[in-house]
Amino acid sequence: MRMRATFFLLAAALCGNTFGAASVPLKIATWNLEWFMTPQTLRALENPAWEVAHGKVPDLGKTLQGLFASGNRAGLLVCGDPAIALTMVLREDPAFASSKTPEDSESVVRAVRERADLRALLTFSVSEEFFTLRDRVGPTLPERAI
């Protein structure tokens, strides 16, 4: 994440906005970035860099919510089992993990009823998108020979 932020800061500096931080290291990094990138790439970065420099500040709550949802979906995709994915998400919740055992099925059902993110994860687990991605990823564990 920090590397991406630095990259956009440098790209914005290439477009002329240094956010008031026109220091020598920023200038050197900007020159290095100009040297490594083709003119076509630099032109392609102008609009996104301008948006970063002049755009509105993103809603941090919605951004974090989207990142958590993406992480939950990625975990479900890798493990392939909604029950395991729900248990792992609940183990990361300090309020749930300290008071209840995540393996208790009644507790998991109650948490799914209370939390919209868990319902969204279950909805994703039966979607066509999940099965398409799961088919592309393939099983993470080898099949056991019978």
Image (cartoon, helix red, strand yellow):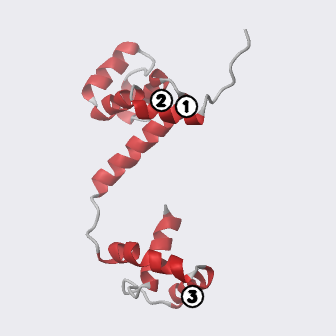
* Identity, as a three-letter code, of the amino acid under mark 2: Phe
Q: Is 70 placed above or below 14 here?
A: above
| Callouts 2 and 3 close, C-beta under 8 Å | no
> What residue does disc 1 label?
135
Q: Earlier in the sequence, mark 2 or mark 3?
A: 3
Q: At 29% across and 51% down in the image, what residue appears?
A: 62
| Quadrant of the image containing the C terminus | top right
Q: Which mark is residue 131?
A: 2
> What residue does disc 3 label?
31
Q: At 37% across and 87% down in the image, what residue appears?
A: 20
Q: Secondary structure at mark 2?
A: helix
Q: Secondary structure at mark 1?
A: helix
**Closer to the eye: label 1 or 3:** 1
| Callouts 1 and 2 close, C-beta under 8 Å | yes
CA–CA distance in space, label 1 to label 3: 44 Å
Q: Is 20 placed above or below 72 here?
A: below
* Identity, as a three-letter code, of the amino acid under mark 3: Trp
Q: At 51% across and 85% down in the image, what residue appears?
A: 26
Q: At 28% across and 67% down in the image, what residue appears?
A: 57
Q: Is 42 placed above or below 108 here?
A: below
Q: Residues within 10 Å of mark 2 (few under 14, many from 20)?
A: some
